[in-house]
Image (tube, coloured by chain):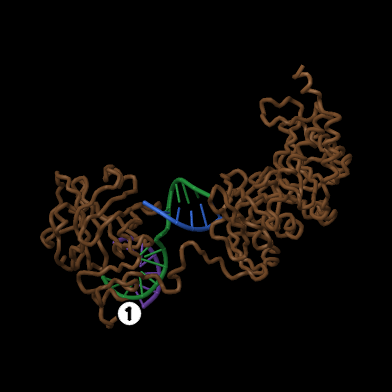
Chain colours: A brown, B purple, C green, D blue
Amino acid sequence: MALETYNQKRNFAQTREPKGKLEKGQHNRFVVQEHHASRLHFDFRLEMGGVLKSWAVPKGPSFNPQDKRLAVMTEDHPVQYLQFEGHIAEGNYGAGDMRVWDTGQYEVTDGSDPVQDVNKGRLRFRLMGEKLHGEWSLVKLGRGDNQWLLIKARDEFADPTWQLETVLPIEEKYLPKATRSKTPHQVVTDQVTDKTPKATRHKSTGAKVAGKPIPVAKAFAAKKLEGDVVVKVDKHEVTLTHLDKIYWPDEGYTKGDLLKYYFEIADTILPYLRGRPLILKRYPNGIQGHSFFQHDVEDPPDFMETIALEVERQPVRYALCNNLATLLYIVNLGSIAQNPWHSRVDDLHHPNWIVFDLDPEGQNFSLVCQVALAIKEVLDGLSLESYPKLSGSSGLHVYVPIKTEYSYDEVARFAELVAKIVNQAQPDLVTLERSLRKREKGEVYLDHLQNAEGKTIVSPYSVRAKDKATVAAPLTWQEVEKCPRLEDFTMANMPQRIKKKGDLFQPVLHNCQTLDDAIEQAEKLWKEVRPKKSKSVSR
DNA sequence: GTGTCAC
DNA sequence: GTGACACAACGCGCC
DNA sequence: GGCGCG
C-alpha cells in the first residue's frame, strides 16, 4: 500500500531498482544517496514502518546549523533501496547515476514513534553514519504539502565550515554556463545547486528591502500610509513596517496613523522622554492583540541610545528615547504609549517629578476630578505648583515637578504624607487602600506608591491602547474643574490642541521646586489633623 | 524537486 | 521537449 | 514585530 506510488513510477523490466514490498522488521537505518538525475540532488531516507521515508534534498545535508536545506518529500521507497547503487536507464523515472553517499543507523531523539512524528511534520533524530553524525531535524513547512527543511541541530558535530563532497564527479551539465569547462570538482558549491540569480542571493531573510529611504516629512505627507517604508531621519534610516495594519479596529486607525501622530508631536513629547529609561509595552497587532512588556532591547539600532542597568545581577539594556528616529522605531515595534522613569540617566536615583495617580476604579470620573482638586488644594497649601493630566485610560495624574536632588525614598515618604492628608480631608472620596476588596464604593484610589525607582508612568502626549485612541492629555486646572471627558482628547485632535494651547506641561520640566519647606509643613500639618488612633489603642 | 514560460 | 529561470523560510515561543 | 530555534 505504502509503496504503490513507488511501483507505479517504475518499469521493473528496465530498471534494476528493487521491487517495492513492505518489510516486517524495524531496523532504524538511514541512507543518503547521491542522485545524478535531471538535477543533481541527494535522497535522504529513514527506515520506518517497513519502508524508507524519503526526501529529495537538492543541496544535500549540511553540518552548518544555519543552513536550512529544502527537503521535498517523495514517495516511500522499499527498505531494499538502502543498498541500491547503479545507473537508471534513460527514459526511466530518476534516470541517471545513483550512489550511496552515506548510510548508518538513526534513532529518534525523544524516543517517540518516528512514523507519528512524520505525520506531525516534526522529526528530531540522531544520525550515526559514516559521514553524518549528531542531532538533526526535519520540519514540515506550511505551504505545499511535501516541503520540509533539513536542519543540523546545534551540538558538538555542528560545523559551519563543513563542505559537502560528492562521491562521483559533477557532470558539466549541472554547472552554470559561466563556470563550465573549469574542472568540475567534487565540492558542491552554491553555483551547482543554487539557481537563484546573484542579485537576489544573500539578502538575509530578516532584512527585507523596503525600497530607498524617503525623507521622513515627505513620507508622512503621503495621502495613504501603507506597506513598508524606509524613512530618512537626520542621518538615520528607520524602517517602518505594516503601515496599514489596523491598530484600533473600531476607529479604523492604523499603525501608520499612530506613527504620523508621533511624528507630528515629536517635538512636544520628546522632552518628557529624553534620558529616561523606558519600559516598552508592545502591541504588535494593535490594541486588541497580544501585548507584552520589554525591558531589554535586544540589538538596538545605531541611533538608539540605551542604558545598561543591573537587574537581578543581569545587565538589562533599557531604551532611551532621545531622538525622533528612536521614537518612530519603538512605535513601529508596537509601543503605543511611552512609559518613562521618573528620573533621568544623568541622575538615576533622584526623580524630577512626584506623581499622584488617581484611579477611579469604576467610579464616576467627576469624583476623580474632585479628588485631584483636593490634592491641588493641599499642595497649594504647601506652596507647591502641581499639574494635572488625563491618564488617557481611566484616571488622572497630578505631577509635582521637583529639583533633581531628593531620593526616591524621600519623595515616596512625602507623597504618602500628602496622600494621607488628602485622605484625611476627604475621607469619603479617597481611599489609600491598595486591595480592591477593601475599597469602599464611591472612593477614588489615590496611588502614591508609583513614586519608586524603576517604576514608570505613561508620558504626557502618549496615545493609549484604548478605544478612541485616547491620549494622556495635560490639562489646565480650570479644565479639571469642569470635569472633562477623556474620550475628547485623542490622537485625532491632540496635534490641533497643542497648536492652539501649546504644551501645558512645560513647567513640569522647568519648575524645579524645592521640597524642604513642604516636607516640614506637611509633617506639621499631619500632626495636627491625623486621627488620634494610637491613643485609643493604648488605652 | 516542481512549475512555468519562451522558443 | 528542453533549457532557463523562479521558487524553495514554516510556526512557535520569547521579549 | 522580529529574532532565534527546530
**Rendering quarter of residue A94:** bottom left
Q: Nearer the viewer, residue A250 or A161?
A: A161
Amino acid type of the residue tagged 1 in the rendering: Lys
**Rendering quarter of residue A449:** top right
Q: Nearer the viewer, residue A337 or A437?
A: A437
Q: Position of residue A275 (x, y in %)?
A: 69, 58
The residue at 12%/62% (across/down) is A14
Q: Residue furthest top?
A: A539
Query: Can you say whether A186 is above or below A373 in the image?
Result: below
Q: Name the residue tied to disc 1.
A: A177
Query: Can you say whether A419 is above or below A470 in the image?
Result: above
Q: Position of residue A332 (x, y in %)?
A: 61, 56
- Left or right, A461 with respect to A62, comes to right
Total of numbered circles in the picture? 1
Quadrant showing the C terminus of chain A: top right
The residue at 46%/65% (across/down) is A204
Does residue A129 appear in the picture of this structure?
A: yes
Q: Residue furthest front?
A: A538
